Amino acid sequence: MTTSLTTQVIVAGAGPVGLVAALILARAGVDIVVLEKRAALTAASKASTFHPATLEILDELGVLGPMLAEGEIVKRIQYRTPDGPFAEFVLADLAERTPFPFRLHLEQARLTPLLLAQIEALPNARMLFGTGFEAVAQDENGVSVTADRDGRKLTIAADYLLGTDGARSAVREALGIAFDGMVYPHKVLRVMTSDDLDLVLPGIAPITYLHNGGKSLSFLKMPDCWRIIIRVPGDVPDEIALQDGWFADRIREVMPGWTTPPTVLGRDVYGASRRVASHYHVGRAFLAGDGAHVTNTRGGMNMNCGIHDAKALAEAMIRALREHRPELVVATAAERKRVAEEMLIPRTDRNVAGGEDWLQKVRDLAASRSSAIDYLAAAAMLDMLERPARAA
């Protein structure tokens, strides 16, 4: 038995990217259907850094207040050696460029329920859990999506499809879009601790990069713990990297005086890839978020870029529906692809490359307030999304 629906936009995937797009569309009066193959929103620990440009979007959507109350507000970024800090950047210096001159650390799983609650309150939005995208057919006037809804077939006709279903995107595969790139040669070990790291690294900032020669550790302060991030060489098996002894040895390599390893609340190892979709659309089916681009996690940019994709494409679809001009969405997709290729990937690769030349550049940037502000603006992704001009 096949059930049929008709709507204006289908959003496939209910992560932060899909739900931001869905809420923008629905608030503008567009009829939407959101498909999510899982039975509920994922609670998995994934991206957790929200940059100022993204905070502006979330504020417009009315979900930022609860996030600020719950998250860790980051006002400083620090670079240091075992002897102490050698460069520090103060995000308050961005106050003239953004109303939110700070980063926010909070699990993305704390954002998605806030978005979902608003979507479900709108009469023109339908949220379908347990419904997995399977196939799409289309012509110049629209798309027809086939989905599996708890074992039964569902077909949905719409003007547009937006695939926000992750790095293994079924939408991207159905469209035959290549996702070429590379796997980074290293993996990442993430260790969570409740210890007070200020006792070991006095004056540590909520984002701190600790360097000693060619070795480094990264530290991110979360609302309930510290995350210690360690690069794992490609020839080290995951089971070895997860052992207490391996973790302790890496800490001592970077900071010999840190002889007592921190208390471990949890740990995991994950890999990362660098890929950009060869096209961001076929006809009236479009890609956003991890389905369109993935990169390493240093700097926390990929999810933010996906949320920016969602805003740009959703707003283009709203205008295209009103003006009957699908070329507006095509042009926006091309611009988002340019941003990924020319800005997102080079910046995240630079963050990973490191090296003495980069560290010297960091010192020089921190020594000049104007250079530091420009550096912070790029790290905050303020130039990676078209934003309305601020009032004087």
Image (spheres, helix red, strand yellow):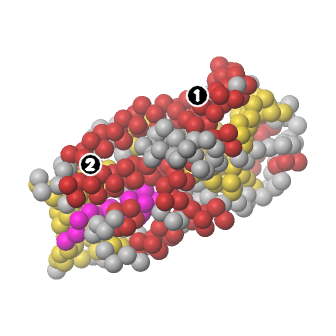
Q: Which mark is residue 353?
A: 1
Mark nearer the N terminus (2 vs 1): 2
| Label 1: how many Cα within 10 Å (few below 14, some 14–19, many 20+) | few
Q: Quadrant of residue 265?
A: bottom right
* Place of residue 304 in the rendered image (x, y in percent of width and height, measured from the top left): 50, 49
Residue at 62 percent across and 58 percent down: it is: 106
Above or below, 98 relative to 151: above
Residue at 34 percent across and 56 percent down: it is: 314
Above or below, 50 relative to 365: below
The residue singled out by tag 2 in the image is 329
Secondary structure at badge 1 equals: helix
In magenta segment, residue 299: no
| Label 2: how many Cα within 10 Å (few below 14, some 14–19, many 20+) | many
Left or right of residue 217: residue 49: left
Left or right of residue 155: residue 236: right
Q: Is residue 250 visible?
A: no
- Name the image quarter holding the C terminus: top right
Above or below, 115 relative to 388: below
In magenta segment, residue 12: yes
Q: Which residues are magenta?
A: 6-22
Q: Quadrant of residue 225?
A: bottom right
